[in-house]
Image: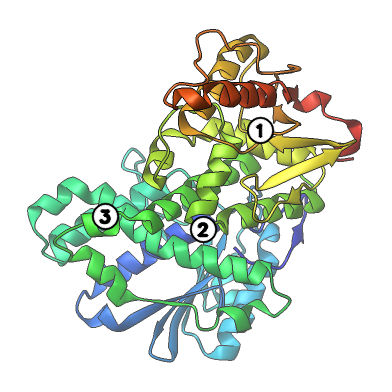
Amino acid sequence: MAVAPQVFPHTAISTWSGFVYQGKLALYHCLKMMSSDYEANRDLKLQLESQDDFAIFRHQQCLSMHQVKAYKDTRFSAYNVGITTQRDNARQRGVPLAYFHVARAVTNIPATFEADYGPVRFYTYPIPPDVAGNITQLFCPLNQVDIFIRNELSSLLTNVARQPAWKNSIVASIQNTLEAIVNSKVVMTHSKIHSSTCHQAVIAASEFIDFSELYGVIEADDYAQFENEVFFLSRLQIDIGTYYQEFCERQDGLSQATCQKLDDYLAAITALKVEGMKSFLRATMPHKKGRFKTLSEFKDQSLDRDAMRLGMFMIFWKLVQAARNDGSDVAFSWLDDGLFYYPTGIHHAAEHQESICYDIMQQALSEDVECLFECGALITSAIDRPSISNVMVGIDATEGVDTAEHELLRENRIGNYKKIAMVSLNNVPESLKDA
């Protein structure tokens, strides 16, 4: 999505909430280009956030520019500024095709649209199979983009690229690999723009993905090679970005300042490298069980939609901006009257507090999770508890250590646990609540 803040009627625009959607639409268009002429289009390049939200190049020539808008508003007037800007840019640069991608059907499109705004056109998508009549539609719902990509990829593998039949059984894995490539570049480019005072077009001008990289995935003989820590980091970023987009979709009345604050959080989270992401998830999901040694384990077990939408993002929304803790296992915290407050994804009701505390302590002991275990409070959605340490029954704080270390380790750990409180979002100090 465009990075410069924009205000439209009754609409607050989050510049990070659509980055996953933008990447998926870019991949979908790349697959369409590959399908249109598989051999001839090997030399194409995908550019991000420079000419437009994304663009297709051959050598130095821009073949098409694409703008992506996932607004809630369906009125043409809400998109008029973006369409006009894209039209003027395309005409000035001599770009023959300019596509405008939207997530909802736009109403009140002028009858003179083609003449007034050419070469801009709304991008067309397949009509869902359960809808009779038209064969295309001028919008791509957020919840249908994955289906469009999967169908296009399956057709490409079978009918165009003439790939072995076994690849049809792993279409989802191939799609994930392709999305990880595009998403990594989207996140990197967004992060550079977010943290820079330079014009985004200057920053992103050299940010290309060669189509040869996508062809390499399509034609690969072994897909295990792609499933490394970098791949799973990108998949986690996609999940977090998707949950953030869903969170923003469900909220009404977010001010532009709030959107900016939330965007800052998401920018910081998605900028985390492999070890930083592991530490972040350990700290914010302390109740999740598992031996989280690799990002694939985190991907499969520790992160879920509700923990982010109902826990983390709600806390970030309701409280003032948290301080970054660079170099610490805890990415964000608030300090009030000598006590540190840490955000979590714990969104369970108060009646589940005993089991949640048990899970936190058991996980901390078995995996030696040291983050958070200092004087402070874990912020939850609904649980208030002065200490998590009174669920020690049934937990051996010295399991797996030498006898000589037992007493000291037990004393230190239990002493630390007594200092950890849980506080509900409603009951954090008033000084931490956003006005």
Identify which amino acid the numbered label 2 is placed on: Lys
Q: Amino acid at mark 1?
A: Phe
Side of 358 where 423 appears, left or right: right
Residue at 19% across, 79% down: 39
Give the mark nearer the N terminus: 2 vs 1.
2
| Closer-to-camera residue (15/286) | 286
Q: Earlier in the sequence, mark 3 or mark 2?
A: 3
Is residue 176 depicted above or below 320 in this figure?
below
SS label for mark 2: loop
Q: Which residue is mark 1?
A: 373
Q: Nearer the viewer, residue 366 or 204?
A: 366
Residue 33 picture quarter: bottom left
- Residue drawn at the location 37% of the way across and 56% of the way down: 231
Residue 344 image offset from top left, x and y in percent:
64, 33
Position of residue 9 measured from the top left corner of the image (x, y, whole percent): 77, 54
Residue picked out by circle 2: 273
